[in-house]
Amino acid sequence: MRIARCYEAEIKRIVGYYCSQQHKFLTLTSISLMIIKNYFTTGYHKLLLMTLLASSTAYSAPQIQSVEGNISDGNIITIKGTGFTSKTNPAPLFWWQADDGSTPSSLGRTAEWASAFQGEISTALIAPGSKQSIAWDHGLSESNSLARVDFDSTELYLHRKYYEDYDVVENVAIRTWVKDVSGTVKVGDTITGETSGAVGVLNHIKPDDGVHGPSLFYSNAHGTLSSDTPTYFLQGEQMVSSSGANMTNAEPYSPTTGGDPGVQRSFNYKMIRFWSGFGQADGKSIFIGLQGAENSGFRITPEHTDNTRWWNSHFTNPMQQMPFRWNIDEVAYRASSEPDVSDARWDYYQNGTLASDATFISRTSDRPGLYNQIYQSQVSNGAQPGSVVFYDSLYIDDSWHRVLICNGNTLDKCNTPEIQIPATWNDNQITVQLNLGGLNSDSNLHLYVIGKDGTPNPEGFRLCPTCPLPPIPY
């Protein structure tokens, strides 16, 4: 009996350890299990045993034992092992590749975008392993790129590949609202302030929206507005265009110029945004973005439900814009368990590196709904024309389950996490269609299965595209 009580205390200790260490795992040896089974087979002891085994199952990391199939882009492979955890819907919610134009892939469960698609097929910049991309110029529209994706779940995982062909600091929009326009103003005109002497060259014009009057946008390469010692238009001054038109500067404020009101400088960039109740009284959103008029550092902002804004300096790993290269973003989202509870997650990764996994309030008593819409990049208040983003792919699932292939032997060393497309999924076997992307010519490939709690196999399973079948770890 004394020995039994000793083991009972040990089980309580181990179960407590499991409950407090969700991402650290113990492995019970077969000898330990034999001893436990011998001493605890009935009543309370049996319940303790079941609790221990359930805890072990809940937090056991996936283990890959074998992979069957040819490691080549587009092929089907079978992954066998343990601890993959069950996935309600094996296929992802949404899968899209630019190689297929604007049409979502039939390998996902969502056949259409939830709004009108925005972007054009391009071969100007193409991700390695792909044939084309979709281009969208943020300097010509304040609308979001691509199209909306809707979801209905408390969890979500997003993976996308994109290329920003612009620097947000260099490509800030320079704008004035004007009123009392006499004559015709057109792109290419030089605008001069009669009091300030400021000079700007128009590269974009937005018509009167019924509230602010016409919006005039200026080049960052000509005139006095973006020189090393800039001269800005003044609020309320008269302005004249080189084509003879006259107008009054109605720009009401200039929080970023540091001078007199009269010019707005901005690159207000929402890179990824989750919405709920857009335009409604209970609407809310969370996004990662940056303001190029200040710097290129990221921030995460939950709007309307949480007083927290995570600035770059608060991140686990500070992030800056990485323009002029192909990048991979990932987001793992989980809603607050109850309104006003700060246990929601919006973990953001760039090229495999975690920026932040801080918790926050995703819904409140006043705004209890769940996020249910996803938008890709959008710029408020404009940018320089030619601020083109290129998209290669977008994967969204209503689960944290996923399969990745990358070039690191542990997941935290992966800077090229390519998403794989599952077709079947159970606790010990998964089939996926390979999506090697930029890894097609890389022989240093490692496979990861991430289970329902976001836990991967501790070490990557080495894949060998040139080895005899089936590939073996080494």
Image (cartoon, rainbow, N blue to C red):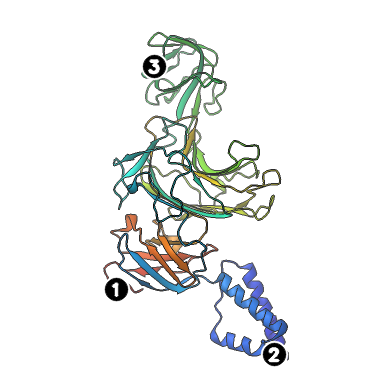
What amino acid does circle 1 point to? Leu
Contact, mark 1 vs mark 3 (Cβ under 8 Å): no
| Mark 2 / mark 1, whichever is N-terminal | 2
Q: Amino acid at mark 2?
A: Ile
Which of labels 1 and 3 is toward the front?
1
| Structural distance between the alpha carbons of marks 1 and 3 | 65 Å
Residue 286 position within the rendered picture, expressed as x and y whole percent measured from the top left: 57, 44
Pointer 2 with pointer 1, Cβ within 8 A = no
Instruction: Work out whether 405 lies above or below 325.
Output: below
- SS at badge 2: helix
Q: Is 2 displayed left or right of 278 in the figure?
A: right
Within 10 Å of the Cα at label 3, are there few (<14), some (14-19), or many (20+) other Cα atoms?
some
The first of marks 2 and 3 along the sequence is 2
| Snapshot quadrant of residue 197 | top left
The residue located at (42%, 73%) in the rendering is: 80
Residue 145: x and y, percent? 44, 39
Query: CA–CA distance between discs 2 and 1?
Result: 51 Å
Residue 461 appears in which quarter of the rendering? bottom left
Of marks 1 and 3, which one's residue comes earlier in the chain? 3
Give coordinates of residue 398: x percent, y percent: 52, 56
Name the residue tied to disc 3.
186
Residue at screen point 65% across, 75% down: 15
Foreground disc of the pair 2, 1: 1
Residue 273 in the image, given as x and y percentages of width and height: 52, 43
Please, is residue 249 above or below residue 66 in the view? above
Q: Quadrant of the N terminus?
A: bottom right
On the question of residue 388 being in view, the answer is no
Marks counted in the figure total: 3
- On screen, residue 289 versus residue 20, left or right, reads left
The quadrant of the picture occupied by the C terminus is bottom left
The tag on residue 3 is 2
Residue that badge 1 annotates: 469
